[in-house]
Amino acid sequence: MNKQDRTKASQKVTLVGAIIDLALGIFKVIAGVLGNSGALIADGIHSFSDLLSDGIVLYAAKHSAEEADDEHPYGHERFETVATLGLAIILAIIGVGIIYDAFEGLFNPSELSHNALLLSVVALSIFSKEALYWYTLKVASTYKSDMLKANAWHHRSDALSSVVVFIGILGSLNGYLYLDGVAAIVVGFMIVYIAWKLGLGATKELVDSSIDADQVKQLRDSIGRISGVNSVHSLRTRKIGHTISCDVHVQVDPFLSVSEGHIISVSVERVAKECLENLNDVTVHIDPEDDETVEPYEALPERAEALGILTKALFNNKCDGEIERIQLHYLESRIHVDFYLPLSCLESGQSGDEILTKLHKTVDPLEGFGKIKVYFSKC
């Protein structure tokens, strides 16, 4: 999915919404003043408040598309998450405000004038905001943007509040003034519920919640089928804006070369990204054994220290002169050692078993060391 296309689509749909919100705000306030409708004036102010959310979305859409930098090494996608949370808060405030105003309206009804004008403006608001809702929701679904989804529901909340005003005006015309307040209370609670769902999702993302369990299982199974992967463990995922990040440990044959282990990690990254569409950051740990169950290695000497211990022991036992290379394997909470010697060693009258026995006598007494192997090669 192209980031530039996503940003342009987000900015376009938000700018269209901002222009409509501005026009509706002006129409509603003017019509409300002329028709003595406090509800329509409040709805107009609601439309003006939508401009604030449109500004938040435009800002987030611009910055979330920026590439990773030193300050944000994982990218800027969470600008969308923060914006979604901000929009949820705005929706909640609007919902509570509608409920409060509805209770006020129940006890303070007022007579209206210019009824045709009021109904026409409200009908225009309902139609345009509902159209904006579906337009924005379509773009949000196409580009999988929770932020645009939140803004779509903001448009829907404005349409619903206009429905409340429409019912209130009709109720006033027919003598049922209380309908305005009752309908407003219902819509207010609907908006608060929508805000709760959006805010909860954004909050979970900000605290690094995992993706769906089914997706995690699908990802684990796909990685486990890769040739060379013996098992998968410590698989962790998290959402970052509209994208997904994961890190995983894969267990391979402990005696593979570093380059082959690297190739397996490349395959793991490729397969993982093919498995989950929005997965764009994969960290792969290549393990020779399951480090969730094996005992820790803190007590074992690291390579430089281990080679120093071996070199000293070999020198003391006078068997270090012909060793070309030493390879260490940290397995089973021990250090297993491979010795590489030239084939010419066997021409001096010593057998392979004699050399192996001598090396065993050298290594076996050393603390932390385990099995040894001897390899001969022709120079």
Image: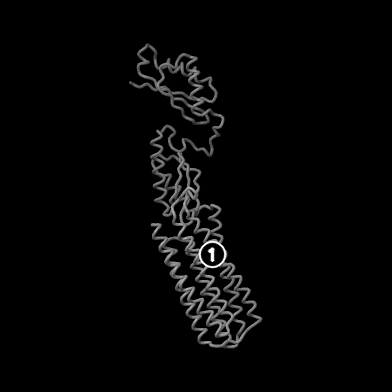
Identify the colour scheme used.
one colour
Q: Could you say which quadrant of the image residue 134 lies in?
A: bottom left
The amino acid type of the residue labelled 1 equals Leu
Residue depicted at x 55% and y 23%: 367
Q: Is residue 226 above or below residue 129?
A: above
Residue placed most toward the observer, 170 or 336 = 170
Residue at 43 percent across and 51 percent down: it is 280
Percent across and percent down for residue 145 are: 46, 61
* Percent coordinates x, y for residue 226 in the rendering: 40, 43
Q: Quadrant of the C terminus?
A: top left
Q: Residue furthest left?
A: 379
Residue closest to the far top: 349
59 on left or right of 108: left
Q: Residues within 10 Å of mark 1 (few under 14, many from 20)?
A: many
SS under mark 1? helix
Q: Position of residue 225 (x, y in %)?
A: 41, 44
Question: Mark 1 — residue?
Answer: 87
In percent of width and height, residue 127 lies at 46, 77
Q: Quadrant of the N terminus?
A: bottom left
- Which residue is found at the position 53% from the left and 55% from the top? 205
Extreme residue toward the right, this view: 107
Dividing the picture into quadrants, the one containing residue 32 is bottom right
How many numbered badges does the structure rendering display? 1
